[in-house]
Amino acid sequence: MPGTRKSTCPICQSTFVNIFPAGQCSACGTRVCGHCIIHDHPDHDQSICQKCIFENTPYGRLSQLETGTLAGILSDPDSDQSSMAAKVLADRQAAGTAPILCRALKDTRPPVRREAARALGRLADPSAVPELIMTLND
């Protein structure tokens, strides 16, 4: 489509086109896709800077927690942030993270299993390969 400018959302890394609603921080000009404004940060009045994204989105809040706390959130069947906890754990690249994520592959919630598998892929820990092979038909 000529004249269409594409950007990447700093929260979800999705490519979005300027014809869709997006927020732009009045302080720094950071553009954020409309999906993330609505779902990740509904009460910021569509004016988000990178600092606000980090401090006020679920990813930002969870990334400030210790690994043990994140493991607890990941395994909590009542938590709605388990999938995001898996992403944060993988992004840390911390030793001992693979066994925590391998346990999450057996979670009853499909989004948690999916994010745990993605996280293990990003970790590239060879010890996780047998567990991932067992989940190929999931």
Image: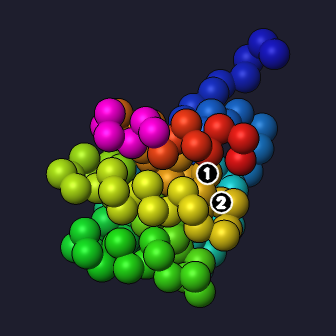
Secondary structure of the residue carrying numbered label 2: helix
- Residue shown at 26% from the left, 75% from the top: 68
Q: Residue furthest bottom?
A: 78
Q: Does residue 127 belong to the magenta stretch? A: yes
Q: Nearer the viewer, residue 97 or 48?
A: 97
**Residue linked to disc 2:** 111
Kind of residue at badge 1: Arg
Q: Nearer the viewer, residue 70 or 36?
A: 70
- The answer to whether 80 appears left or right of 52 in the picture is right
User: Residue 10 placed where, x, y %?
Assistant: 47, 46
**Residue linked to disc 1:** 114
Q: Residue furthest top?
A: 2
44 relative to 97, above or below: below
Residues at circles 2 and 1 in contact by the CB criterion of under 8 Å: yes
Secondary structure of the residue carrying numbered label 1: helix
Tell me the distance, in whole angstroms, between the alpha carbons under discs 2 and 1.
Answer: 5 Å
Instruction: Give neighbour class at mark 2: few <14, some 14-19, many 20+ (Cα, 10 Å).
Output: few
Stretch in magenta: 125-130
